[in-house]
Image (cartoon, grey):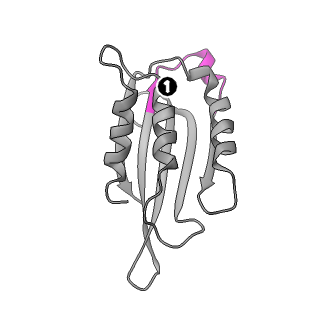
Amino acid sequence: MENALDVLRAELEVGRSKTSELTTRAAWLAFTRFARQRFATAPPPDSDGLLFQYGTYAFTGRPMFTVDLTRQFEVNDAEGVHEHYVQVHCELRYACGPALDALGSYDSWFFHDADADAEEWFAAVERRLEPLLDRRPSEIDVYEELV
């Protein structure tokens, strides 16, 4: 998982055209490719999770409609005790407007190895993303953090 951020960035570059900016659809497809790749993680069940969330937030100082595509890895110490999480984020930000404001806020988790179907989760998330798929985000931020 040490190179997870680089893997996500590489997938995003695959979706970027040489002549245009990344669309929401291209970012989502890049994230799903990234999400399908498995990494060496702590023992299951909650060691490798996917989070999809959106809403209007002012994280950058001004209100923006933000879609956050996140992968979370649990990190344990040498004895196997939880130490912290590493989250790899792809945040897509859009100028606010009535159509996006009407979406409100939403979040959904998926955990690999938890007897759930990833493809069903991806399909449900994509239905939520439908109003944004052909839009180009105003800003994209790809980063990693410890939580």
Q: Is residue 15 above or below residue 87?
A: above
Residue 43 seen: yes
Which of the 4 image quadrants contains residue 18?
A: top left
Q: Is residue 142 above or below residue 101?
A: below
Residue 61 seen: no
**Residue 51 in the image, given as x and y percentages of width and height:** 55, 48
Q: At x 34% / y 48%, what residue is drawn?
A: 5
Q: At x 45% / y 19%, what residue is drawn?
A: 136
Magenta region, residue range: 92-104
Q: Nearer the viewer, residue 76 or 118?
A: 118
Q: Is residue 72 above or below residue 20?
A: below
> What is the count of numbered marks?
1
**Residue 74 in the image, given as x and y percentages of width and height:** 47, 66
**Residue 7 in the image, given as x and y percentages of width and height:** 35, 46
Q: Amino acid at mark 1?
A: Thr
Q: Nearer the viewer, residue 5 or 118?
A: 118
**Residue 94 in the image, given as x and y percentages of width and height:** 47, 23
Which of the 4 image quadrants contains residue 131?
A: top right
Q: At x 67% / y 30%, what residue is drawn?
A: 127
- Per the image, the residue denoted by label 1 is 24
Location of the N terminus by quadrant is: bottom left
Q: At x 42% / y 68%, what residue is drawn?
A: 84
Q: Nearer the viewer, residue 109 or 115?
A: 115
In the rendered structure, the answer to whether residue 44 lies left or right of residue 84 reads right
Q: Answer whether residue 98 is magenta in the image.
A: yes
Q: Residues within 10 Å of mark 1 (few under 14, many from 20)?
A: many
Location of the C terminus by quadrant is: bottom left
In the rendered structure, the answer to whether residue 5 lies left or right of residue 108 reads left
Label 1 residue SS: helix
Residue extending furthest bottom? 79
Q: Answer whether residue 55 is magenta in the image.
A: no
